[in-house]
Image (cartoon, rainbow, N blue to C red):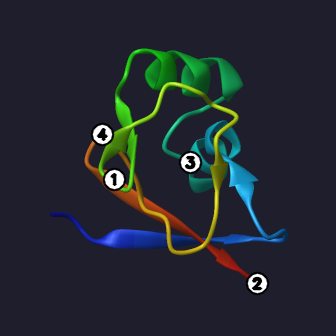
Amino acid sequence: MSEVEQVPIRDEAIRLGQLLKLAGVVPDGAMARMVIENGEVTVDGVQVLRRGTQIRPGMVVRYSGAGLTPVHR
């Protein structure tokens, strides 16, 4: 498995689509929605189809070879 990049967030959690945009793995919300709805994104190894899914520190999101986890700053 690839390395997991830590993405600093302000709040206790972040929506999945926002995390993908913040990390720069998708250019905008429309692309985030598309890749999530197409089943290309997993959270802790489980396919997720809702971009509003709350992602908390310690959870690992994977998309297109990238591993992401939010960290509270």
Nearest the camera: 21 or 37? Answer: 37
Residue neighbourhood size for the residue with mark 1, other residues' Cα within 10 Å, grouped as few (<14), some (14–19), many (≥20): some
Quarter of the image that includes the N terminus: bottom left
Foreground mark, 3 or 4, reads: 4
Residue linked to disc 3: 24
Mark-to-mark CA distance, 3 and 1: 10 Å
Residue 64: which disc?
4
Whole-percent x and y of residue 53?
64, 40
Q: Which residue is mark 1?
A: 66
Label 2's element? loop
Instruction: Give the amino acid at mark 1.
Output: Ala
Kind of residue at disc 3: Gly
Kind of residue at disc 4: Ser
Q: Name the side, left or right, on which 8 lies relative to 42.
A: right
Sequence-first tag of 3 and 4? 3
Residue 60, located in which quarter of the rendered image? bottom left
Mark whose residue sits in front, 3 or 2 = 2
Q: Is residue 45 above or below residue 67?
A: above
Label 4–label 1 contact, CB within 8 A: yes
The residue drawn where x is 52% and y is 16% is 34
Mark nearer the N terminus (3 vs 2): 3
Q: CA distance from mark 3 to mark 2?
A: 18 Å
Which quadrant of the figure has residue 57?
Answer: bottom right
> Answer yes or no: do the residues labelled 3 and 2 have beta carbons within 8 Å?
no
Instruction: Examine the rendered structure and indicate whether residue 73 appears above or below residue 66.
Output: below
| Residue drawn 56% across the image and 48% down it | 24
Q: CA distance from mark 4 to mark 1?
A: 6 Å
User: Label 3 neighbourhood size at 10 Å, few (<14), some (14-19), many (20+)?
Assistant: few
